[in-house]
């Protein structure tokens, strides 16, 4: 699955890890996260993420 990087702070969303503190289970694709989810580091929305290399 594709990893995504937060453009403002550099946080990497790794679908294999998810975001347990944010209620996102491991194995959840970025596309399947609800649109109101925000970066756990800086708080920006999903629209500020881009696919990570």
Image (cartoon, grey):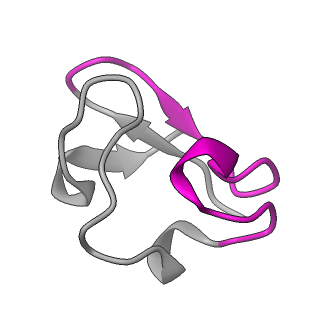
* Residue 37 inside the magenta-drawn segment: no
Answer left or right for 29 relative to 49. Answer: right
Front one among 30 and 18: 18
- Place of residue 40 in the rendered image (x, y in percent of width and height, measured from the top left): 41, 34
Q: Residue at x 69, y 53 (%)?
A: 18
Screen quadrant of the N terminus: bottom right
Where is 19 relative to 31, above or below? above
Q: Residue at x 80, y 68 (%)?
A: 27
Screen quadrant of the C terminus: top right
Where is 30 relative to 39, above or below? below
Q: Main secondary structure of the magenta part?
A: loop
Where is 52 relative to 3, above or below? above
- Place of residue 12 in the rendered image (x, y in percent of width and height, measured from the top left): 54, 33
Answer left or right for 51 relative to 53. Answer: left
Q: Residue at x 59, y 60 (%)?
A: 23
- Place of residue 29 in the rendered image (x, y in percent of width and height, measured from the top left): 62, 72
- Place of residue 20 in the rendered image (x, y in percent of width and height, measured from the top left): 69, 49
Q: Residue at x 34, y 34 (%)?
A: 6
* Residue 13 inside the magenta-drawn segment: yes
Front one among 17 and 22: 22
Q: Where, by quadrant of the figure, is residue 7 drawn?
A: top left
Q: Where, by quadrant of the figure, is residue 46 drawn?
A: bottom left
Answer left or right for 4 relative to 27. Answer: left
Where is 25 relative to 19, above or below? below
Q: Which residues are magenta?
A: 8-28
Seen as rendered, the residue at the extreme top is 9
- Label tally: 0
């Amino acid at each position: 699955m594709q990893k995504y990087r937060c453009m403002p702070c550099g946080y990497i969303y790794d679908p294999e890890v998810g975001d347990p503190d944010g209620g996102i289970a491991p194995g959840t694709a970025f596309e399947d996260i609800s649109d109101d989810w925000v970066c756990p580091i800086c708080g920006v929305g999903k629209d500020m993420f881009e696919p990570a290399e």
